[in-house]
Amino acid sequence: MFNPEEITYSFVSPQQWVSIMGRIMEIDMPFWEGTGLEGDAEHYTNMFAHPRSITYVAEHEGNIVGFVNCLPAEEITDWFRQDNESFSDYYGEIGPNSSYVHGITVVEPYQRRGIGSNLFSLALNESRHRGYDTLSGYFSHATSKSILDRFHPRVSKTCNWLGEGKPFELGVIDLDMSHSNGVQTSEALVPYK
């Protein structure tokens, strides 16, 4: 087993995406298995290398064991379009100035040890620091919904966008000063090397 105090957290700039791409895709691929995004390196590059992306990694003994990635919700509006090209009700819940959690994943042996919560706190505080009004995203009932619930979301709606049996929660958290809780912004952290 490991000591959670041995986990280090680093901010990864969009320019550094190439250096972590292989490990991030390896960690996240099981989630996307059987979907159109399985193995889609271009999709990952668009999300992580976006100039306004927010990415943090958790490392143990030099290996990435978890990550969180956010980008402006305005950059993913197509995800919320319905067949008739209008926006779904979900997009209206998010608001115009939201940091969207594209992904938060921690590898199996490291789950349920606070790593996902720490990554989420870093992303939340960085989003607030950058002037976003909300932090939003879809959170798996199987894994990340418990993290969402700890931050008292203004919006929490169950949906099955990956099909029945895989429920997700659309979550929207209003950002304010109370979310900083001593978490440092990216400028104060050691950059990923």
Image (cartoon, grey):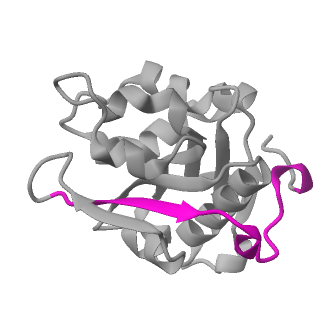
- Viewport quadrant of the C terminus: top right
Q: Nearer the viewer, residue 91 or 111?
A: 91
Q: Is residue 91 left or right of residue 115?
A: left
Residue farthest to the left, as pictured: 164
Quarter assignment of residue 12: top right
Q: Is residue 139 left or right of residue 121?
A: left
**Residue 186 colored in magenta in the image:** yes
Q: What x and y, as percent, mark residue 73?
A: 52, 38
Q: What x and y, as percent, mark residue 169?
A: 31, 61
Figure check: 118 above or below 57: below
Figure check: 83 above or below 58: above
Disc tally is 0
Q: Residue at x 64, y 53 (%)?
A: 133
**Residue 113 colored in magenta in the image:** no
Q: Is residue 11 left or right of residue 145?
A: right
Residue farthest to the right, as pictured: 188
Q: Residue at x 74, y 63 (%)?
A: 8
Quarter assignment of residue 135: bottom right
Q: What x and y, as percent, mark residue 181?
A: 76, 77
Q: Which residues are magenta?
A: 166-188
One can see residue 20 in this view: yes
One can see residue 144 in this view: no
Q: Residue at x 31, y 33 (%)?
A: 87
Q: What x and y, as percent, mark residue 176?
A: 71, 67
Q: Residue at x 53, y 64 (%)?
A: 173
Q: Is residue 123 left or right of residue 77?
A: right
- Viewport quadrant of the N terminus: bottom right
Q: Nearer the viewer, residue 183 or 107?
A: 183
Figure check: 166 above or below 54: below
Residue farthest to the top, as pictured: 42
Figure check: 96 above or below 85: below
